[in-house]
Amino acid sequence: MIWCGAAFLWGSASFSLYAQDTTPIVRIEHRTGSSVELIERLEQASGWVISYSSRLCERPNITLSAEPQTLLKYLEEIFNDCPFSFLLRENRIILQPLQDRSRNFTISGFVRDSLLGESLPAANLFDYNIGKGVISNNYGFFSITLPNGAVDLNVSYVGYKPGRRKFNLQRDTVIFIDLAPNLQLQEVLVYGMESSQDLTARAYGGYVLPMENIRQTPVLFGETDLVKSIQMLPGIQGGSEGFSGLYVRGGGPDQNLILLDDVPVYNVGHLLGFYSVFNTDIIKHVTVYKGSFPARYSGRLSSVIDIKMIDGNKEKIRSTLNVGLLSSSLALDGPIKKGKSAFALSFRRTYLDLFAWWIQRNQDETSNYFFYDVNAKYNYDFSLRNKLYFSFYYGRDKYYTTYNSREVEYLDSSDKSIRSSVEDNSNIGWGNLVGALRWNSVWTNKLFSNLTVTYSDYVFFIGLESSNKVNDTWESYEQRYLSGVKDYSAKIDFDYYPARAHFIKFGAGYIRHIFNPGIDIVKRDIDSESPTDATIGDLYLYGGEWNFYLEDDFTIGKQVRINMGVSGALFRSGDEVYRTLEPRLAVAYSPVKRWTFRSSYTEMSQYMHIVSSSSIALPTDLWLPVTDRLPPMTSQQISSGIDYNPGEKRVYSLSLDGYVKRQKNLLHYKESTSFFDYSTEWEDKLTLGDGLSFGAELYLQKLKGRWQGWTSYTIAKTTNTFPDLNDGEAFPTRFDRRHDFKINVSYNIRDNIRAYGLWQYGSGMPVTLPNEKYYTPNLPYQNTPSELQFAEDFGKYNDYRMPDFHRLDLGVSFTKKRSRSTRIWDVGVVNAYGRQNPFMLYFSNDDGDEVTSQRNLKQLSILPIPIPFVRYTLKF
C-alpha cells in the first residue's frame, strides 16, 4: 500500500508539469554561469529549496532570460536538453528526469589524438552521473553501456587535456572522442564536478609513460632512450652504469616480456647495451607492469613492457630529424590515402664508424663499429569496423677489426702471376628482425577482436677471416659462429563489454620457438682448388607453446574495481610436455575521495631462459628452452599499494607499494664451470635453485607549475638459494641494490627555455672477491722445469659490495617555433661532477711481480668524467 501511494503521489506530481505553474516569480542579477551556480542563485533569490537528480544534464555555461519569470521557467531553461517531471512540497521543488531509465544503450567508438588522428590506448572514460567507467583497449576502442537519458562522459589520457561529452542518450551511439595534447594548448578552464572515485586513473599499479617526458630526459651523448627512462621507475634497475638492462624486483634480464606491437624482442641493446633499440620518434605508448599482471600477458616472471608504435597521420605529412653526437635519426609519417590509410617510417644510424675511419686512416690495423635500425608501419581502414595494420622492425650491430694488411702474389689456374691486397679480419654482431600483421574487427558495439600473426628473429654471430702462405701457396680460411632464437606465432584476442560494470578479455595463441645454441661454419680455400665447407654443431632445439587467457575487469558500486582472470599454457620440448595454470587477482578500493588502495596476487611461469657467460646482459647470452631435465621457472607475487590521485586543481600525486615475490627453478652455473666449458653438455653445467625478493617503493610526482618532476625511492632485498652453491646458504643476487633513489626535475625558465636535471643514487651492488691468493707449484715432468702457479680462494657468493653509485645529469632545452616547423636544441652534461662509479672491481699488482708485489683492489669506471651532449631536433 505504501508503494502504491507513493506511485500515485508521484504520478500526480508528474501531471502537474502540464498544470498551472505555482512557483514564485524570481529576479536574479547574475544570469550567466554553470548549472550548479545558477541553481544556487535561484535558491537564494526565491527562498525555495531545489532538489534535482544527478542524471539531469548539467552545462558549464548558461545565460538565463533577462525578464523575471517563475522559478519553474528558469529551471526549464537550465535543463532544456533534459525534460523533467517535478514534485512541489511547500517551498521545495523536486526534479526527476522524465525518461524511462529502465532501458540501457551502448556508447562505443574510438579515442584519438585531435591533431594527429592517432588512436589512444588505455584512455580513461568515466560517466559522472552513474559513477561507472571503462578503459579503451590497445587500439583506442571503447564500449560502455549506460541507462538512457543524460550522459556526462569524461575522458582522460596521460599527457593530454581531459575531454568531456554531455548528451542525451536515446539509442546505441558511435562517437569519436578527440583529445588535445597538453603541450600544444594554452591553459583552458574545464567546468564540472570532479570524480571522487575515478578508479580508472591507474590500472592496478601499472605505469603509463608519456613519450614527451621520455624525450626530455637527459641521457648519454644526448640520445633519447626508452629503456633508460623505464629504469627510472621505482623497483626497476639498470644494472651496471650506462647499460640498457632491466632488473625488475629482483628478476634477471630474461624475465622481462618486452613487446613491440605485440612481438617479443629478445635483445634490446645497441652498442653493447649502452643504447636501447627503440627509436622514441616512432613510439606512441608505453605501459609497464611489474606487480599485477593482467591475464593476457604471460611467459615471463618479472615485468611486462608493452610498446606501441605510432599509426601515422592520416591527414598530412609530418617529420622529425634528430642529430646527436653519436647518431642521427629521421622519422616520417603521413597519409597514403587521406582519411583511410597512413604510414610511419623511421631510420637511425650511428656514425662512429665514420669517425673511426677518419682517425685510423692509413693505419694497418683498424677497429670499427656501427649500428642502425629501421621501423615501419602501415595501416588501412577498410571501414569503421575493419582495420589492417602491418608493423616492421630491423636492427643490426656490428663490431669488426682488420689487421695483417699486405700485398701478395700468386699464380692463377693458367699460371699467370697476380698481385693482390689481402687482410685478416674478425667481427661480431647481433640483430633483431620482427614483423606483425594484425586485423581489427568490431563485430558489434560490444565485441572487438584482433587477429595477429607475428615473426621474430634474433641472431648473434662471430666471424673470422684470415690468409696464410703454406708451402708457397696462399690459403684462405673463414669461420663463422651463429646463435639465436626464432619465433612464429598466431593469436586472436577478444574484448567484450557485456554490461557497464564488466570488461572481459579472452583469447588464445600458439608460438613455435626455434632455438639455435650455436653453429660453427668453416670454409677453407687453397688457391681456389679443392675448397672445403664444413658445418659443426648444427643443432636446433624446438619448442611449441599453446596459451590461452580469460580476464574480467569489473566494478562493484562506485568504490571497488576488480580484475580477475586465469592464464594457461602448454609447452612441448622434445618428449616433455609442461602444463601450467596461473591465477591472477587485483583489487582497487577507493573508500574516500582521491585515495585508492590496491592489492594483487599473481602467478607466472617462464619456459625459456638466458644462459649467460657474464655478469651483465650482453648479446653473447644464449636463449634456451626448458627440457625434461630443466623445468619451467615459476613465481608467486603479492603486491599492495596506495595511490593518491589529484584532481584538476591539485599538483601532487603519490604512490606507495610493497611486495613479496618467490621464485622457483632459477638457473645458475655450477661451481668451477661456465659457458665455455666444452667438456660437458650444457644442461650439466647448470643447477636449480629458488629466489626470494621483497621491498617497498615510493613514487611522488609534481604535475603542474614551473617546477615539475618526480622522485622515487626503493628499498629491497633479493636472495637466491641453490643447494649446489655457497654450501646451500642463501646469498644476495648480483643486482641486489638495497637502496635506490632517483629525482628528475624540470623548470620552465621561459616559454621556450626549459632546464632539467636527473640525480640518481644506489647502494653498492654485491660482488664475489677472492679472500686470499696462494702459490701452487707444479712438479717437473720429463726434465721440464715447472712454472710458478697461483690460485685464489673465494669465500661466500657475493659477500662484498661495491662502492655506492650516484650521478648528476643536467640539460637545457631551447625551443623555437616557426609557422611550419619547430626547432629544438638540447645541451647538457652527463655525470656533471665527475663521479667515478664502479663498473667492476679487480686486483692489480703494484710492480708486476707475482711473488713480491702488493695486490691492490681497484675499480674500472665506464663514465669517469663529465661528458657533454648536444642534440638538435627539427620537426616539420
Image (tube, rainbow, N blue to C red):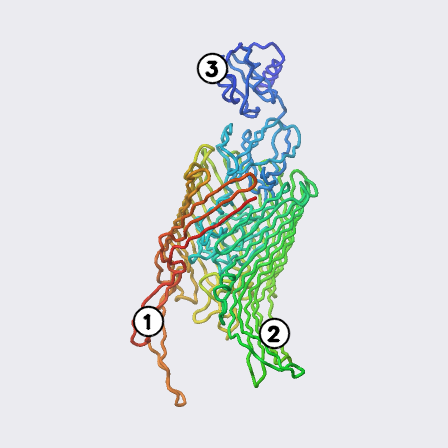
Around disc 1, counting alpha carbons within 10 Å, would you say few (fewer than 14), some (14 to 19), or many (20 or more)?
Answer: some
Dot 1 or dot 2: first in sequence order is 2
Residue located beneath label 1 in the image: 845
Query: Residue 818: image x %, image y %?
Result: 53, 40
Residue located beneath label 3 in the image: 44
Q: Is residue 315 visible?
A: yes
Tell me how far mark 1 sits from mark 2, CA to CA.
Answer: 44 Å
Quadrant of residue 72 within the rendered picture: top right
Q: Is residue 850 left or right of residue 571?
A: left
Tell me how far mark 2 sits from mark 3, CA to CA.
Answer: 93 Å
Dot 2 or dot 3: first in sequence order is 3
CB under 8 Å between discs 3 and 1: no
Dot 3 or dot 1: first in sequence order is 3
Residue type at numbered disc 3: Gln
Query: Residue 206: image x %, image y %?
Result: 50, 45
Residue type at numbered disc 1: Asn
Q: Is residue 552 above or below residue 395?
A: above
Around disc 3, counting alpha carbons within 10 Å, would you say few (fewer than 14), some (14 to 19), or many (20 or more)?
Answer: few
Quadrant of residue 483 within the rendered picture: bottom right
CB under 8 Å between discs 2 and 3: no
Q: Nearer the viewer, mark 3 or mark 1?
A: 1
Around disc 2, counting alpha carbons within 10 Å, would you say few (fewer than 14), some (14 to 19), or many (20 or more)?
Answer: few
Residue 535, numbered circle = 2
Q: Is residue 665 visible?
A: no
